[in-house]
Image: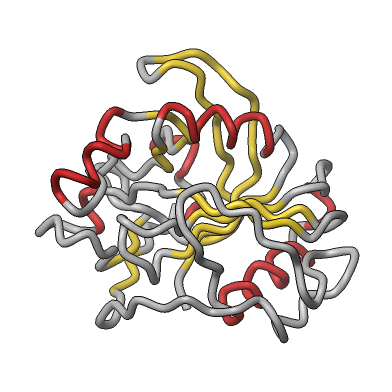
């Protein structure tokens, strides 16, 4: 099984508008979606939206829930809202904070430095994921993820999931200026993970990457 590691160039903090992203129905985005922001005003880079559209088209046969799409924009610092829940029917976007893996940011800068799918790397992986079933584990209610691309095909074996974590609570950002790091999972504050679990059901698409 291939083990992918992708170095990342110097991080750039950006706040891009969705206008002109060109993600056509039935795949993703309307031209001027309304923005409903949970943790600050931010939108994903249009180049990342284009990648998500391509992933949606590539894996469309496996995507059974199409009312929402999640995009993790790891171009942004962990203190910024960078996990976007987009509802194509209403055009609403909800932006939340999400942690990246400690193996993706060994110096704990708050910026993702690299992607990796290597088992034991504790890094975040890029690519398209299919949301799997919920379960109750060490972090409470969580959602399994299935890697759909070569860059994240080890997700199930690595137990890469959506879960809540203390190191993603707002107080951590207030004290340190950044979130803590996961083992490669998409980790959220406890209140935000409940929103993600409710809004991103089994069969939905999650796309992780950076512009």
* 191 on left or right of 88: left
Rendered image quadrant of residue 157: top left
Q: Determine the residue located farthest toward the left in the rendered image.
A: 107
Residue 64: image x %, image y %? 83, 42
**Tag count:** 0
| Residue 23 appearing in the image | yes
In this rendered view, identify the residue nearer to me: 153 or 102. 102
Pick the residue in front: 60 or 52: 52
Question: Which residue is rendered at x = 48% and y = 66% of the image?
Answer: 209
State the image coordinates of residue 72 (x, y, percent, origin top left). 50, 58
Q: Quadrant of residue 95?
A: bottom right
Q: Is residue 198 above or below residue 91?
A: above
| Residue 1 picture location, percent across and down | 44, 52
Q: Residue at x 46, y 61 (%)?
A: 126
Q: Quadrant of residue 111?
A: bottom left
Seen in the picture, residue 138 relative to 91 is either above or below; the reply is: above
Q: Is residue 78 left or right of residue 177?
A: right
At horizontal 61% and vertical 30% (from top left) the residue drawn is: 197
As drawn, 173 above or below 128: above
Name the image colouring.
Answer: secondary structure
Residue 121 seen in the figure: no
- In the rendered structure, the answer to whether residue 119 lies left or right of residue 64 reads left
159 displayed left or right of 87:
left
Task: Say which residue appears at 24% left-offset and 37% top-offset.
Answer: 171
Residue 155 on image: x %, y %: 47, 43
Determine whether 148 is above or below 77 in the image. Answer: above
């Amino acid at each position: 099984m291939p083990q992918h590691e992708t170095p990342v160039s110097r991080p750039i903090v950006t706040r891009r508008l969705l206008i002109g992203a060109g993600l056509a129905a039935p795949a993703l985005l309307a031209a001027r979606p309304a923005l409903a922001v949970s943790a600050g005003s931010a939108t994903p880079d249009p180049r990342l939206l284009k990648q998500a559209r391509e992933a949606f088209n590539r894996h469309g046969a496996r995507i059974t829930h199409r009312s929402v799409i999640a995009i993790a924009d790891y171009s942004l610092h962990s203190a910024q809202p960078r996990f976007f829940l987009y509802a194509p029917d209403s055009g609403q976007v909800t932006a939340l904070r999400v942690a990246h893996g400690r193996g993706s940011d060994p110096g704990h800068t708050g910026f993702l430095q690299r992607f990796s799918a290597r088992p034991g790397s504790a890094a975040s992986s890029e690519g398209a994921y299919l949301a799997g079933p919920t379960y109750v584990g060490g972090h409470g209610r969580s959602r399994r993820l299935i890697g759909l691309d070569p860059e994240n095909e080890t997700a199930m074996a690595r137990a890469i999931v959506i879960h809540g974590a203390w190191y993603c609570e707002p107080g951590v950002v207030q004290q340190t200026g950044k979130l803590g790091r996961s083992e490669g999972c998409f980790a959220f504050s406890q209140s935000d993970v409940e929103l993600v679990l409710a809004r991103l059901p089994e069969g939905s698409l999650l796309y992780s990457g950076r512009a």
